[in-house]
Amino acid sequence: LDISEATPLLLETIDNDFDSMVNTMYRMANYAAHSGNPVQVFISAPRANKAAFLFEPTPPLIRTLLADLSQPNEPNAIRRDKLPSLVKRLELIRQILNSNNGHEVLSILPAYQWWAIAWLNDRLIAQDKFYFSDNVHFAKEVYPMNADPQIEKIAQLAAQIQRNPGYKVANNECIFALTTALEQYDTGQKYQQSEAVTVAAMAETLATALDRRDMFAKGEGAFSQRCKAFAQAVYDFVKHHKQEGQFDARFQRFFLAAYAFLFIEACSNKPKSTPEESSE
């Protein structure tokens, strides 16, 4: 039987637990992508459909995570040109599920997008597992957050005041500048200080703490001014998200994970310091 001219009928029983569904979907999507033949999986009776890939028993959560790849009029169907992206997306989902906390991360992915995967990566690094970072890069591309530009700016400013701690250090070192600034922000709010006073306290505390711990970075311009620029960016970000009612404990957890990933990335991409650059 030439399956390029005729569609074979395959009767197969699929385990209906979540992980089995994802694995079956991945296996059949892989076949469709590499063979060039359409694959259509129906819950009961087949029906006419021209999709290159159709998987009727797609779990609702997976359907949500693949929504940008699906056909508008058929949420379980994928066009042929989207098959390579589908395979990569399902491979990411499978790797998440194969990790500790994988189901928790997947369930919050629609709300926190790639930040949740950055958090999972932090957990794995804490266990001396360093294989997951490429998945974070990919997830950042396909599951971006609206706040990403602001966090990227904060991370880049952080790289101007805190030296690169390396990717194998404890997470609290990666987020040291940010958590120090956040503590001073909270103090300013507690005592109802003005924005100018709070930002100044954030910057001064940062400069002192980084210098005392020998964690400061060299960069262009006065170190105190770089600390102030970072403090102002953090202040603006937190103020905005608090006004939107978003800066709760869960948001902060994933925000810190995303920041840590972007900070290490910014440090790695930072040009080497020149003699003219200052740490004062």
Image (cartoon, rainbow, N blue to C red):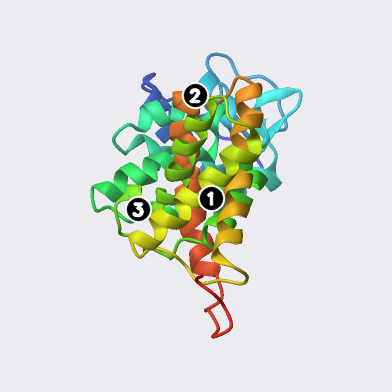
| Mark 2 Cα shell of 10 Å, populated few (<14), some (14-19), many (≥20) | few
Quarter of the view holding residue 247: top right
Residue 53 visible in the snapshot:
yes
Which type of secondary structure does the marked residue at label 2 adopt? helix
Q: As drawn, is 56 to the left or to the right of 135?
A: right
Q: Which residue is mark 1?
A: 203
Q: Is residue 160 positioned above or below 95 on the image?
A: below
Dot 3 and dot 1 residues touching (CB under 8 Å):
no
How far apart in space, not on screen, are marks 3 and 1 (Cα)? 18 Å
- Near-viewer residue (231 or 15): 231
Q: Is residue 261 positioned above or below 146 on the image?
A: below
- Residue 190: mark in rendering: 2
The amino acid marked with disc number 3 is Glu
Q: Earlier in the sequence, mark 1 or mark 2?
A: 2
| Residue 26 in picture, x, y percent from top left | 47, 39
| Residue 46 in picture, x, y percent from top left | 61, 19
Q: Which residue is mark 3?
A: 173
| Residue 3 in picture, x, y percent from top left | 59, 43
| Residue 76 in picture, x, y percent from top left | 62, 26
